[in-house]
Amino acid sequence: MVVMFVFSMTAVAFAQGPDGNKRKGKYTYKGVYKACAKRGEVKSKTPLISAGDKTMAQWKRIFDKKKFEIFKCSEEWSKLSKEEINNIYTYLYSYAADSPTPAKCK
């Protein structure tokens, strides 16, 4: 019984999603768009896609396949480190439409 409990708790721990820093991710995500707007690729300093625009599964698929072209600003995305990308993923995943605390506004 104890072994079953340990295995189930391990599975839950691994199923919780990405392990980055969502606060840093939000800051970095917004910074990408500020730099991109300054360069002139987008008109607004506000990110084009909100965390609540997609489900957790959709965010997972985007980041697993590294399909960052939906965000625009490819020059800024190419300069991000793996840690920064993981932090952004954690932020977006944590506030996805089907998360316990979905993002309500852009």
Image (cartoon, rainbow, N blue to C red):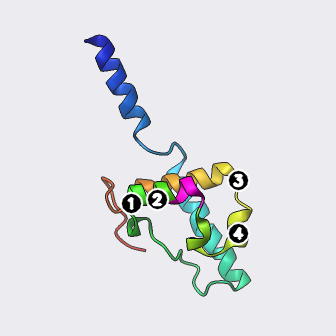
The amino acid type found where label 4 is placed reads Glu
Residue 67 image label = none
Kind of residue at disc 1: Ala
Image x and y of residue 80, in percent: 70, 59
Give the side of residue 59 with respect to residue 84, left or right: left
- The residue carrying pointer 1 sits among few (fewer than 14), some (14 to 19) or many (20 or more) residues within 10 Å by Cα, namely many
Q: Earlier in the sequence, mark 3 or mark 2?
A: 2
Residue that appears at 53% across and 55% down: 89
- Rendered location of residue 28, percent (x, y): 61, 61
Residue annotated with mark 3: 81
Give the distance between the C-alpha atoms of the residues marked 3 and 4, in whole angstroms. Answer: 11 Å
Pick out the residue farthest to the left: 1
Reading the image, the residue beneath label 4 is: 76
Relative image position of residue 73 (x, y in whole percent)? 66, 74
Q: Residues within 10 Å of mark 3 (few under 14, many from 20)?
A: few
Q: Which residue is mark 2?
A: 59
Q: Are marks 3 and 2 in contact (CB under 8 Å)?
A: no
Residue 96 numbered mark, or none: 1
